[in-house]
Image (spheres, grey):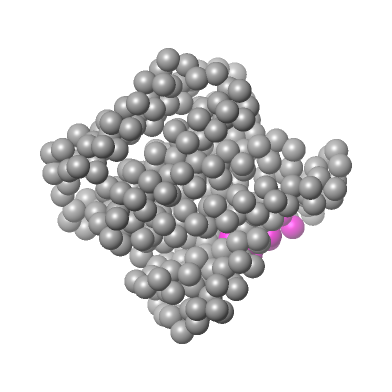
């Protein structure tokens, strides 16, 4: 079950990243974060009310609040990086945040077997190679890499925090709801400050019309992201955090393939080799 939930996480995150990257090429990144997460709040709020999730409120929700504070910073950095650099470069580097939950797993005493350690090494190498990797280039590309590394640490911290925020399914819905409400609060405050300082909340071309036409895509990004957080939490609760984290961080392979199909980004030999290594690492992890 751990492998199944973690691989579902990688699929959802990969598609959400591709969608978020496309949206930020026309719409300010903060607006994409706030609008997409607001959709998730509405849906999760309905689920929590329907399942009686508010009865699960307790001290563990502070982990969800912390994840909600870190999340917008990571998403904003990541979406800005996606708008600046190629998805095939940014997305794999973003997965380096796997070091955070894997490190937490090792600290709490998890000791993967030899086959699983080999799987982790092969999968991480494949993730990085799937991006090119094109680490040299113009200042804009270097800025994209810096933003991506900030996002990577943030994503890793969110993974570690959200896995601790609940112990039941209804509690998980409540934790995800609290996380998203915090996301929107923090992101909305940052958007307000940005606008007060002369920043834009709407696209230069099209304004609100572009936002309305993008609502389905924004909703998809927000719901896919929250669903990925949920499946990751279940993966971490059903098995070793180290295994769940590495398998969930295969999402760059999904983003690269989506960019290949949707944006016609060419897949280089090293990227194809990286995707293959990531899959080999997945098999080793699942069989370890």
Which residue range is magenta in the image? Answer: 183-192
- Give the answer, above or below, for where 47 lies relative to 35: below
Q: Residue at x 73, y 52 (%)?
A: 215
Residue at screen point 20% across, 34% down: 118
226 within the magenta span: no
Q: Indicate left or right for 227 with 202 as reference.
A: left
In front here: 83 or 227?
A: 227
> In the displayed image of the protein, which residue is found farthest to the left?
114
Quadrant including the N terminus: bottom left
Query: In the rendered image, is residue 100 in sight?
Result: no
Is residue 60 found left or right of 200 in the rendered image? left
Is residue 133 left or right of 243 when viewed as pictured?
right
Could you tell me if residue 276 is visible in this image? yes
Nearer to me, 59 or 234:
234
Examine the image and state in which quarter residue 96 appears.
top left
Image coordinates for residue 285, horizontal then vertical, percent:
24, 41
Q: Which quadrant holds residue 160? A: bottom left
219 shown above or below 199? below
Q: Quadrant of the C terminus?
A: top left
Task: Give me the residue at 74% from left, 47% from top.
Answer: 214
Q: In this view, does 256 lie above or below 237?
A: above
């Amino acid at each position: 079950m751990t492998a199944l939930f973690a691989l579902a996480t990688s699929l959802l995150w990969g598609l959400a990243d591709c969608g978020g990257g496309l949206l930020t090429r026309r719409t300010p990144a903060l607006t994409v974060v706030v609008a997409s997460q607001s959709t998730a709040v509405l849906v999760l709020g309905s689920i929590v009310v329907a399942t009686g999730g508010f009865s699960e409120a307790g001290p563990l929700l502070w982990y969800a609040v912390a994840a909600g504070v870190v999340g917008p910073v990571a998403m904003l950095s990541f979406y800005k990086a996606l708008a600046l650099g190629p998805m095939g470069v940014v997305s794999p580097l973003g997965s380096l945040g796997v070091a955070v939950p894997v490190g937490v797993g090792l600290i709490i005493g998890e000791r993967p077997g030899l086959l699983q350690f080999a799987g982790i090494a092969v999968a991480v190498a494949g993730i990085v190679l799937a991006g090119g990797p094109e680490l040299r280039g113009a200042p804009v590309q270097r800025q994209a890499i810096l933003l991506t590394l900030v996002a990577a640490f943030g994503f890793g911290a969110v993974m570690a925090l959200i896995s601790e925020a609940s112990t039941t399914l209804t509690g998980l819905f409540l934790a995800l709801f609290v996380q998203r409400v915090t996301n929107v609060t923090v992101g909305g405050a940052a958007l307000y400050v940005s606008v007060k300082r002369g920043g834009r909340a709407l696209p230069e071309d099209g304004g609100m019309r572009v936002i309305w036409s993008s609502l389905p895509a924004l909703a998809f990004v927000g719901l896919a992201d929250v669903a990925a957080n949920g499946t990751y939490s279940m993966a971490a609760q059903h098995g070793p955090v180290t295994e769940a984290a590495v398998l969930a961080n295969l999402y760059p392979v999904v983003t690269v393939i989506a960019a290949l199909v949707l944006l016609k980004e060419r897949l280089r030999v090293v990227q194809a080799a990286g995707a293959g290594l990531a899959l080999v690492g997945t098999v080793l992890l699942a069989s370890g």
